[in-house]
Image: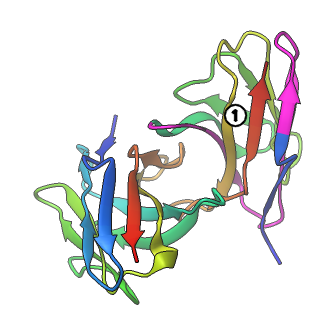
């Protein structure tokens, strides 16, 4: 079974600064997807960014980018120019890409609470 | 707009009563999921369904039951056998290999 570990229960950053959230995972599979979700106080789960394991290029979505290190099984999220609206819980998640795999949805880490200091 | 609707947003029940949480989607997704969220625990999978009239247990299925009679609907029943039912419940749906789309959740409080 796959596991996802987020070692930072809470992070704090000054507004406009850059912050990196860590995520590591354990799997014996070679093909999979990785995701970062944001959960603001409203508790709505919002997809931030996704990465396919077969792609070497790191995914980027505006101020959000990832550092995907497949050999190290690491998938960190970098948020540039932090804004007050970025304050939320951030969850790293894994999904198998094999046929029949991934049928059970996503495996989530326990989350990192990101605080933005004005 | 397509999406997932969970109702109600807040639900209160007395201990010993069964309660059913509603989840409806109009995204035409085959797969649907139920997750439970507790503080500091992340999201844990309760049940999932890949197709109508078929579903599988997730990691924490004890004390829960589901049905999938229609593609659009995947209700979750929290039974009296669930020892600690107070939690936030999230329903989701997806296509294979794609991200999950989530509903807004139901906060269940059992006293």
Q: Quadrant of residue A53?
A: bottom left
- When the figure is inspected, residue B1 is found, relative to residue A70, above or below; the finding is below
Please name the residue shown 25% across and 44% down the image: A27
Front residue (pair A39, B62): A39
- When the figure is inspected, residue A13 is found, relative to residue B35, above or below; the finding is below
Residue A103 in picture, x, y percent from top left: 54, 46
Residue A10 in picture, x, y percent from top left: 33, 52
Please state the extent of the stretch shown in magenta in the rendering. B11-40
Q: Quadrant of the C terminus of chain B?
A: top right
Q: How crowded is mark 1: few (under 14 residues within 10 Å), some or many (20 or more)?
A: some
- When the figure is inspected, residue A50 is found, relative to residue B19, above or below; the finding is below
Front residue (pair A99, A71): A71
Residue B94 visible to an observer of this rendering: no
Please name the residue shown 37% across and 61% down the image: A34
Please name the residue shown 46% across and 36% down the image: B41
- Is residue B29 in the magenta section? yes
Number of marks in the rendered image: 1
Q: In which quarter of the image is the N terminus of chain B?
A: bottom right
Question: In the displayed structure, does residue A101 sit left or right of residue A30?
Answer: right
């Amino acid at each position: 079974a796959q596991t996802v570990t987020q070692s930072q229960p809470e992070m704090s950053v000054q507004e406009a600064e850059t912050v990196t959230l860590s995520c590591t995972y354990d799997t014996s599979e070679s093909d999979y997807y990785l995701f970062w979700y944001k959960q603001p106080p409203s508790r709505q789960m919002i997809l931030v960014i996704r990465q396919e394991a077969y792609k070497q290029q790191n995914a980027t979505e505006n101020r959000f980018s990832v550092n995907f290190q497949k050999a190290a099984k690491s998938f960190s999220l970098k948020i540039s120019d932090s804004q007050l609206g970025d304050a939320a819980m951030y969850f790293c998640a894994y999904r198998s890409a094999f046929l029949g795999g991934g049928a059970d949805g996503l495996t989530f880490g326990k989350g990192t609470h990101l605080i933005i200091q004005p | 707009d397509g999406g997932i609707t969970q109702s109600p947003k807040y639900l209160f029940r007395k201990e010993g009563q069964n309660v059913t949480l509603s989840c409806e989607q109009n995204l035409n997704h085959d797969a649907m999921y139920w997750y439970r969220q507790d503080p500091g625990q992340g999201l844990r999978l309760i049940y999932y369904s890949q197709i109508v009239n078929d579903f599988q247990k997730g990691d924490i299925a004890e004390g829960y039951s589901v049905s999938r009679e229609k593609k659009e609907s995947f209700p979750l029943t929290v039974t009296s056998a669930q020892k600690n039912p107070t939690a936030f419940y999230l329903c989701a749906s997806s296509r294979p290999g794609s991200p999950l789309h989530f509903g807004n959740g139901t906060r269940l409080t059992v006293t």
